[in-house]
Image (tube, helix red, strand yellow):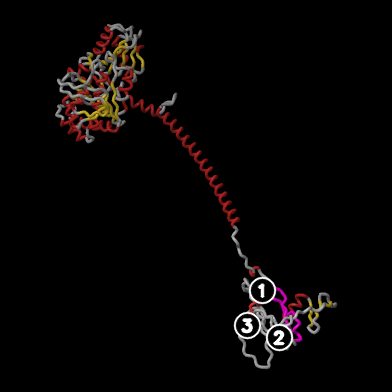
Amino acid sequence: MNDPQEPYDPYAGRQQLIGYDPYGRPVYGQVPAQSVQPAPPQYEQQYDQAYGQTYDPAYGQSYDQGVPGQQQYHAPRQEYPQSPQQHQDPAHGYDTRQDRQWIPQQHAAPQAPQAPGQPEPRPEPQPVPAPRREAAADPEQDPGYRTEQFAFIDQQDEESEDVIDWLAFTESRTERREEARRRGRNRVVALIVVLALFVVGGLGYLWYAGKLPFLDGPGQKKAAAAATGAQKRDMIVVHLRNTKRGGSSTALLVDNVTAKQGATVLLPNTLGVAKEDGTGTSLGKSVEDGSLGTREALDTVLGTHIGGTWRLDTPFLERLVDLVGGIEVDTDTAVPADDQAKAPAVGQGPKQSLTGAMAVAYATHRAQGEPEAKQLERTGKVLYAVLRKIPGDPKAAATTVESMGQILDPGLDAQSLGALLSRIGEHAKEGAYRTEVLSVKPDGGLTDDASKRVVKELLGGSFTAAQPGAVPRVGLKDATGDEKAQTAAKAALLNGGYAFVDGGKADRTAPASQITYQDDAQRDRAVGVAKTLGLAETSVKKAESVVNADIVVTLGKDYKPS
């Protein structure tokens, strides 16, 4: 364009290349009107080296130096005049003076005032600061472009975040599934191990207890040894005498010191025992007669060692119950009041509170036509309830016994009885207690079940308790069906110096007599018994006895009284 302010400028219509900006774009400017100064040699040289051309300012032409020794002509550039009034903002890299010379984008330092008449000095070109470009750390580096000259804006991609979250979710869910499978496998393995241990432990227990078929464990052997009297037991016999109506009830109080258990064994009055002269009688008659040999007779029948006799009359039982503060009993029947005996009524049901008088009425009650075993069971319930109320301290228990004012057997004082009752009472409080009724046959002999389950297990009755030199116990069981033969055999045994044990009658008759023993030490004595009765030695053999005695004689039809 033509500049109206400079109409006579001969160079107003021409522009020439004065250099390149930092981005490689050419920068054109007008030649000054007064004096035209050539571009700095460094920019000319850079241009020539970059494009391989030589520019002649006199002709406004450039020659290609691409081929040595040959010049190529180029048409002069077409210049477009600019008005001197059209100025660029210094902030964009152009000077506002008329020479339109390129000035780098940088504020010049203040200069000293110029003398008149001197040409205006050309300012040194300054590098234009590139936007978003950091200064080079090393000035000797290549001035070309570097990656740190560009700035990149990181934009958050929501879809990428969603994909990352989904991958993390699927990975965590897969890990959870794998962990659940591992836990499941571990639980299955642990369950199998526990079941295997349970089975092995159960089989081991059954083997130890001897409950497996065709196998005898050590526990069974120990139980057998305990049943034959290996355990230590303390026991006394109690005779409860009814002073108002008559009659008596007998029981054995047992303290198993080894097994730490207690028991009450109720003895029927029909149990056959022997008198001091060797004649037979019943337990009830022996107690009523006041025989001093009742305890020894029981030892002979049961094969036990009873430590003492406690004669407990009903008035003293009533006082004992009142001293311990009453008892609670599960009564099986109602007992009506008896004005003549001054006995109050007793209700029926569980946990009936009984006073001393009510306890005596319930313990001695026996209905019309009722078996003796029922009345014995009521006596056992009262004794069990009293033992639970006895103090656990032996001294306190002895004081309670002394407070009854009862005259005891000389062989059993208050201290010994109180200590025994306190120990048995502790077993009753802990539930380690049982009550059994000794079953007997109508003729007074023991049943096979009573001999095995009660005599052996609870009382520890020993068939081999006779020591060398002691009188052996000989049990007589009649299988002849002839009472005269049984009487003659009993008399022969008593005359021979043997302790007689009445074994009652056999269930059926036997054609031949038999003499059995359990301990090998008793074989010679068994042969002596056979000679006393006039039986052959071949009738003697070792076998399990059904009567609680060292030697058992079963009379057959071949026995002939002498």
Quarter of the view holding residue 247: top left
**Mark with earlier residue (2, 1):** 2
> In what element is the residue under mark 1?
loop
Magenta part of the protein: which range?
Answer: 9-30
Mark 2 vs mark 1: in front: 2
Residue wearing tag 3: 108
Position of residue 207 measured from the top left corner of the image (x, y, whole percent)? 43, 29
Residue wearing tag 2: 5
Residue 390 in the image: above or below residue 469:
below
User: From mark 2 to mark 1, how far is it between C-alphas?
Assistant: 46 Å
Mark 2 vs mark 3: in front: 2
Mark carried by residue 90:
none
Position of residue 426 measured from the top left corner of the image (x, y, whole percent)? 26, 33
> In what element is the residue under mark 2?
loop
User: For the point 24% across and 13% down, which residue is it?
Assistant: 494
Q: Nearer the viewer, residue 373 or 147?
A: 147
Q: Are marks 2 and 3 in contact (CB under 8 Å)?
A: no
Residue wearing tag 1: 141
Quarter of the view holding residue 143: bottom right
Horizontal arrangement in the rendering, residue 188 relative to residue 444 (left or right): right
Position of residue 120 measured from the top left corner of the image (x, y, whole percent)? 68, 88
User: For the point 66% across and 93% down, which residue is it?
Assistant: 116
**Mark with earlier residue (1, 3):** 3
User: Which amino acid type is shown beneath numbered disc 1?
Assistant: Gln
Residue 110 in the image: above or below residue 157:
below
User: Which amino acid type is shown beneath numbered disc 2?
Assistant: Gln
Magenta includes 130?
A: no
Whether residue 475 is visible here, answered yes or no, is no
